Image (cartoon, rainbow, N blue to C red):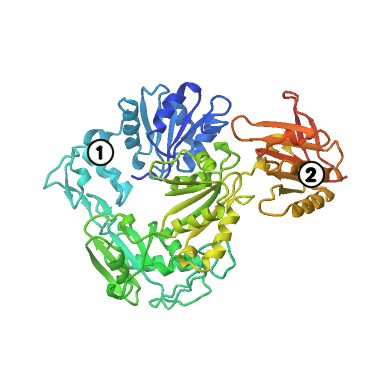
Amino acid sequence: MARLTPPAIVILGPGALATARRIQTRYAGCQVHALQGRVEADVSYTELGAHLCDLYARGTPIVALCAAGIVIRCVAPLLSNKGVEPPVLAVAEDGSAVVPLLGGLAGVNVMAREIAAALAVSPAITTSGELRFGTCVLNPPDGYALADIAQGKRFVSDLLAGESTRIEGEAPWLDAAQLPRSDSARLAIRVTPRAWDGRDDELVIHPRSVVAAVTVPGARVGAGAGASGSGSASAGAGSPSATNADHGANSSSDSQTGSGARVAALVREALDAHGLAPLSLAALLAPSEHMADPALADAAASLNVPLRFAQPRPEDGEPPSNLLHAALRVPYQTLHDDANARVALALAALAIDPDTIGRTRGRLTVIGLGPGSADLMVPAARTALNEATDILGYETYVKMAGPLRADQHVHGTDNREEMQRAHHAFELASTGRSVVMVSSGDPGVFAMAAAVLEALEEGGSKNADWRAVQLAIVPGVSAAMATAAQAGAPLGHDFCMLSLSDNLKPWTIIEKRLRHAAEADLVMAFYNPISRARPWQLDKALDIVREYRAAATKVVLGRDIGRPGSTLRTITLGELRSSDVDMRTMVIVGSSTTRGFANGIDGGEWVYTPRWYE
């Protein structure tokens, strides 16, 4: 069974770190989670029970390097449905034991064997059926789905009680299994796309061998972001109204979800008309010009299958069967080819890999890594990185985004090549790839999100493939927010963020904004405060600020916050000198109300700006 999420390797102390790193090499994209303050790892947590429960609830596979009893007690309150639980394993700190605990239907025993092989030990597998037969018949491989888990449990129980079985259909993964077989057996393992009829003497496994091609001739297909030259961030947004000739529906005011529901209903009706199980569906296929139609995405999500696209040629015939001719690379039988129904079904002899069907809609996700520490990266950014085929960004930031898989393509560039990088990202995504653009901090704060939207506004008006790209921007923790959090709450009232770099705007504009912000008594966060090319600008900026702020005004200096070797200082505006600052320093200048008090730790203080004025 495919694991959509890399496992989380959870440790309690430094004694488990070496074993955790050995396991980590087996799973690209996974991270080591460690108890905060006890050991440095990729992700820190403060309380084991809450952390394990959070991982479990999100469906993240868990490899916990601690006693099995600890793990069991932590996640016990969440145990309910065996069919949806992620793999959970306990591993001895020294790697001497690997114990699968939960997730038998999600491949936990497969993981146990993989980890045990990496540690050169034998896994402690206790699943009766797997020990007896050498395989878990209730966990078929990719491309196959079990019809009914409850019936499957009864079937395996009967086999363990001494019954034999026969196998009907193509099940090559069972060839090496030590199943008790007999051609005259009462029980049968039946591999078929046909719907299960409820018989309790059959274990039905559906090969995902059916593709549904759909056309929506009455829909107003969403043009995607930038279609009108507006540069909207909602790439792919539109207002489709999928007409349904069979049911008389033709309303452009229906919701996107409703349109998707009607498309999904048409597909289900077509499957039912031919006695095919919904679980036998491998993919939903649609015309490429409808790529940005959210109704199709809704329909695919409702059917729980990938959405693929094809561009038919004249020789491919009439829709919707022409989509099948254009996209499928395996022999198949066409079913339900009806212009009124607007659904054509292709039935292949074996399971179909969705990646071989047509092409997918490309994605471009712009993420912020946060200030540098892995535990300050938002989960959505890590998910985007895990799912990416291509990762672009300034080389330093791309390295910070790791660990990455060996099969991911990394395109590191110089920090000054923003527009070229944005164009390259759209070119890759428009071919169906899943692309991530990496920024530090928050991508919308002096970073790549604006460059990506500018590129889309300019290039999208000329390139329909760019407009069809699914664009998303994932926020991150900005340097100002990270520094402020370490210091206390200096941004607790109105504030502004200003870049002192004049690479993209004239210094006269910077001076004007500084003067207005200082006069308005806003707390100010300075990005790009100083560099070798402009060593004088910070002093000039401070001269302006000092015209409006008292010398005793609190100033917070955060250097490399969230990264190794970070430093945090609190001084006054009167004490501040440009020699205290470099390009990697965040400068936060307080307002007239910003104050501080001793925090009792190494002579430091908490700095905050009250939410009120006297």
Residue 293 versus residue 22 in the image, above or below: below
Q: Nearer the viewer, residue 266 or 407?
A: 407
- Where 274 falls versus 572 (above or below)? below
Q: Quadrant of the N terminus?
A: top left
| Between 602 and 198, the one nearer to me in the picture | 602
**Where does residue 395 sit, x and y in percent of width and height?**
52, 43
| Residue 237 appears in the rendering | no
Residue topped by disc 2: 540
**Is residue 288 visible to the viewer in this orientation of the structure?**
yes
181 with respect to 312 (left or right): left
Tag of residue 255: none
Q: Residue at x 69, y 35 (%)?
A: 558
Image location of residue 102, percent across then percent down: 39, 36
Dot label at residue 135 = 1
Q: Position of residue 43 (x, y in %)?
A: 53, 34
- SS under mark 1: loop
Residue 557's x, y, as percent?
72, 35
Residue at position x 57%, y 59% in the image: 453
Q: Earlier in the sequence, mark 1 or mark 2?
A: 1
